[in-house]
Amino acid sequence: MKFKNNWLAVVVASVMSASLVLPAQTAEAATRAKAQPRAVAKSKAPVKARAKAPVAVRKAAVAPARKVSKAARPGRVVRAAYVPVAAAVPEFKPVEVNAPALLAGKVATAPSSSMAAASGASGASFGQLYGLHRTNDPLDLKSSAALVVDQDTNEVLFAKNSEAVLPIASLTKLMTATVITDARLSMDEMITVTAEDVDTEKNSSSRLAVGSTLTRGELLHLALMSSENRAAHALGRTYPGGLSAFITAMNNKARALGMTDTRYVDPTGLNSRNQSSAKDLAVLVKAAYQQPLIRELSTSHEYTARVGSRQVQFHNTNSLVRSPSWDIGLQKTGYIVEAGRCLVMQARMAGRKFIMVFLDSAGKYSRQADAERVRRWIEVASKRNAVSGFAAQKTTS
């Protein structure tokens, strides 16, 4: 009888112990659920503040606790415990899609005067004329060519017509900036905008009047941030050896980087013979990112420059740099009719650094919308692949 009482005491103690463990874990799960909206609110904080806490770490998932076995024997207690696990690196199933025209070799790999004439006559981009816009992809991107690459590992996560050679418009200015910074020219040297810098290719407007004098650093700032064509042309014109030497340096740099699909004929991108592929441009973004000055100037929100007797304020052509949802390290936009809307970016998402290239996007805001689609895809995949931090531990007393 004494033995039975002792045995019953042990069983009761075991059940009470288990009942204490489970409510405590349930309370913890509820606390985490309540805290979730706060975590979302924090994601709207300025980029610099959020950079200290990567998304994958902040949102690491935790699996529910396992129930205590009813068959627990006397003297043995089964406890369920949360074991913290390092945030899992998101795993992605690479996506690659190509247009039939590209696979059949019907997309030109060299500048074509006939394509430029057809584009000018129809108002359609090269990508539209090639039929690249009819390429379907899982993310429903509006860009006819795109590429998403892990900056550190070179892993390709998403590729859409990434080897199609297309006009790149003002993405050209990223190479212009790379050559200027490589030359280590004085950024304080004063440069005057002349009639030679006026666009006669597309007759585009500019807020830099002929006769305006700015430093080389200011011209570089306006070329990267606001895509100022006269600023970019003045940078090339005042390069040692002149404009022709500058264009040669641009093409030499492209070859040195292994950009075999790329050709430059001017420092602005107004000429449709400035052409490249998404694959090559990802290489350029990675190289340009090594220059702190390019990173700083390309992501600057705005700048006020003295133009003649006036103070003129310039803004970034990429609205995403002002969004608290983004952590952008480098960017450049581009547009001419032949190229469509273009965008290249380096950004941190889900605790990783990515390079994104979007070429020949049809709508005015569709290149930014495509970037948002990619960001959501990466973040969803990151959450889905976060390994649960639950493990059952058995301890024998």
Image (spheres, helix red, strand yellow):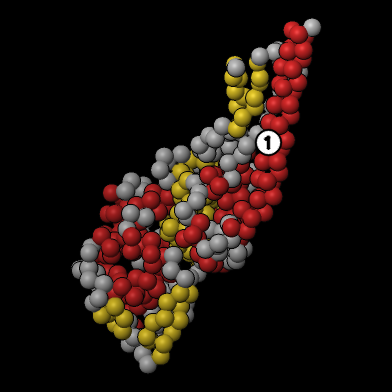
- Which residue is most to the front? 2
Residue 220 picture quarter: bottom left
Q: Is residue 116 visible?
A: no
Q: Residue at x 40, y 54 (%)?
A: 285
Question: What residue occupies the far left of the structure in this picture?
Answer: 241
Q: Position of residue 219 (x, y in %)?
A: 34, 74
**Camera-side residue of 265 and 29:** 29
In the image, taking residue 210 as reference, residue 204 lies left or right, namely right
196 versus 67 height, above or below: below
Identify the amino acid type marked 1: Gln
Q: Is 1 drawn above or below residue 165 in the view shown?
A: above
The image quadrant of residue 111 is bottom left
Residue at left 36%, top 48%? 259
Q: Which residue is at 67% across, 54% downward?
A: 37
Horizontal side of residue 320 vs 259, given as left or right: right
Asked whether residue 281 appears in the rendered view, the answer is yes
Q: Few, some or many C-alpha atoms within 10 Å of disc 1 (few <14, some 14-19, many ≥20)?
A: some
Give the image quarter of residue 221: bottom left
x, y (%) of residue 351? 49, 46
Residue 237: percent from left, percent from top? 28, 73
The residue identified by callout 1 is 25
389 to 372, vertically: above or below:
above
- 179 or 241: which is nearer to us? 179
The quadrant of the image that shows the N terminus is top right
Q: Nearer the viewer, residue 290 or 38?
A: 38
Horizontally, is 30 left or right of 233 in the view? right
* Residue drawn at 74 percent across, 23 percent down: 15
Percent position of residue 66, x then y = 69, 27
Give SS at disc 1. Answer: helix
